[in-house]
Image (cartoon, coloured by chain):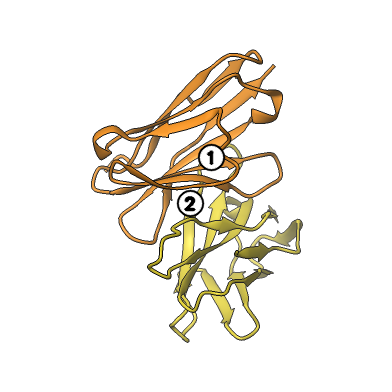
Chain colours: A orange, B yellow
Amino acid sequence: DTGVSQDPRHKITKRGQNVTFRCDPISEHNRLYWYRQTLGQGPEFLTYFQNEAQLEKSRLLSDRFSAERPKGSFSTLEIQRTEQGDSAMYLCASSWAYEQYFGPGTRLTVT
Amino acid sequence: AQTVTQSQPEMSVQEAETVTLSCTYDTSENNYYLFWYKQPPSRQMILVIRQEAYKQQNATENRFSVNFQKAAKSFSLKISDSQLGDTAMYFCALYPYSGAGSYQLTFGKGTKLSVIP
């Protein structure tokens, strides 16, 4: 069990560019979550998958954000036309039941 | 909607002493779980302790224990014999379990704990 992994760990991009992050959950976990954490705040929920189905999306997830989980394994989070307000830590978590285990996060900086 | 409030942005404690971090919450759900997560500087979030709302007995994990007051909607974390490695942001989180859908964690804003040698 290697835990939840995320790639890349850091991403710097120019405003207007598209970025994609990857999350690999713990292998036996069927639930996968994306959160966003800004400086000095707790993580805020973005979206949730059970297997390959995206079952819940936050109002925070604007039309520029899209997430997928093909075949119920890894997940990707794409942000199109990035804005400076998208700068944050993007956290992925996975679970089998109610305990969520977090990855190290991807820190996005939009310049 | 759920809310979690941590009213102490920063705290400090001397090594080997005891410290208590406060958390209050609000939810309309009858069934839920409460968690404390620890996020060390530049490191990932780690689950410290959990409490099922239907259990009256307070959870303990080694040096970490909670004081769960369901009627008051209060969920404080006590760290005994504080160690330098306890220095971190601590987040209180609520997970409502209604079976009706939402599986999201709602977090407080966190308490930054510094353990002083």
Q: Say what amino acid the circle numbered 2 marks.
A: Ile
Q: Looking at the picture, tell me which residue is in the foreground, B24 or B62.
A: B24
Is A59 in front, or is A38? Answer: A59
Q: Which residue is mark 2?
A: B46
Circle 2 sits in a helix, a strand or a loop, which is it? Answer: strand
Report if the CB atoms under discs 1 and 2 are less than 8 Å apart.
Answer: yes
Rendered location of residue A107, percent (x, y): 57, 29
Q: Position of residue A7 (x, y in %)?
A: 43, 26
Q: Quadrant of residue B115?
A: bottom right
Kind of residue sitting beneath label 1:
Arg
User: Is the residue marked by circle 2 packed among few (<14), some (14-19), or many (20+) residues within 10 Å?
Assistant: some
Q: Quadrant of residue B86?
A: bottom right
Q: Decide if residue A24 is on the left or right side of residue B22.
A: left
Label 1: element kind = loop
User: Which residue is identified by label 1?
Assistant: B43
Q: Is residue B57 above or below residue A55?
A: below
Q: Chain of mark 1?
A: B
**Residue at (60, 17) in percent of width and height:** A12
In the displayed structure, B36 sits above or below A56; it is below
